[in-house]
Amino acid sequence: MSDEAGRPWTVALVCGASASGKSRVAVPLAARHGVPLAEADDILTALQAMTSPSQQPLLHLWVSNPEAALSWSPEKLAEVHFAIAEVLRPAFLAVIRDHLDFLAPAVFEGDYLLPDLASDFGGEVRALFLSAPTEEGLAANLQARCPC
């Protein structure tokens, strides 16, 4: 079912790893449909401002331990990434529900958004997952964006 603007969704989630091209897809998607772009990173930033590392250690992990991103194995990084995504899940679901309750379409993008967030909402919430074609491509994208 489409709304009056012809969108088959109310909330579109653009998910994927950092540097996978989420912004390159999300920004024009939001512009094309004339809807706001919501950033998962903004929610993380707000929650970090409202909590301390002792209250929410995972939410503060990269700020408290920036060298971990360079020294941990890919498996450990993935494990921590998904753990952070689970901590953020209630906040993301609240934002999605709010957009649905108020019929306020939006494109929502971010590293910690997981496609299964769309599963409880039928067609009102759609998820798009982007991945880099190769590990080298992802590393090159990160390198180009990171001053580290």
Image (tube, grey):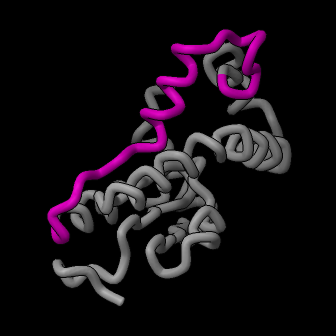
Judge from the rendering whether residue 65 lies leftward or rightward of residue 97; answer left or right. Answer: right
User: Which residue does the image show at 71% across and 17% down from the upper left?
Assistant: 65
Residue 98 sits inside the magenta stretch:
no
* Res 141 seen here: no
Q: Magenta span covers which residues?
A: 32-59
Q: Is residue 110 above or below residue 3?
A: above
Judge from the rendering whether residue 33 lies leftward or rightward of residue 50; answer left or right. Answer: left
- Quadrant into which the N terminus falls: bottom left
- As rendered, which of 10 and 109 lies closer to the eye? 10
* Res 120 seen here: yes
Outermost residue, front side: 101
- As rendered, which of 43 and 141 lies closer to the eye? 43
Residue 45 sits inside the magenta stretch:
yes
Q: Classify residue 6 by image quadrant.
A: bottom left
Instruction: State the count of labels.
Output: 0
Q: Is residue 73 above or below residue 28?
A: above
State the image coordinates of residue 96 (x, y, percent, origin top left): 48, 55
State the image coordinates of residue 53 (x, y, percent, origin top left): 71, 12
Q: Classify residue 24 by image quadrant.
A: bottom left
User: Which residue does the image show at 74% across and 27% down from the upper left?
Assistant: 58
State the image coordinates of residue 146 (x, y, percent, origin top left): 46, 34
Outermost residue, bottom side: 1
User: Which residue does the image show at 51% across and 68% down from the upper left?
Assistant: 130
Judge from the rendering whether residue 43 lies leftward or rightward of residue 39; answer left or right. Answer: right
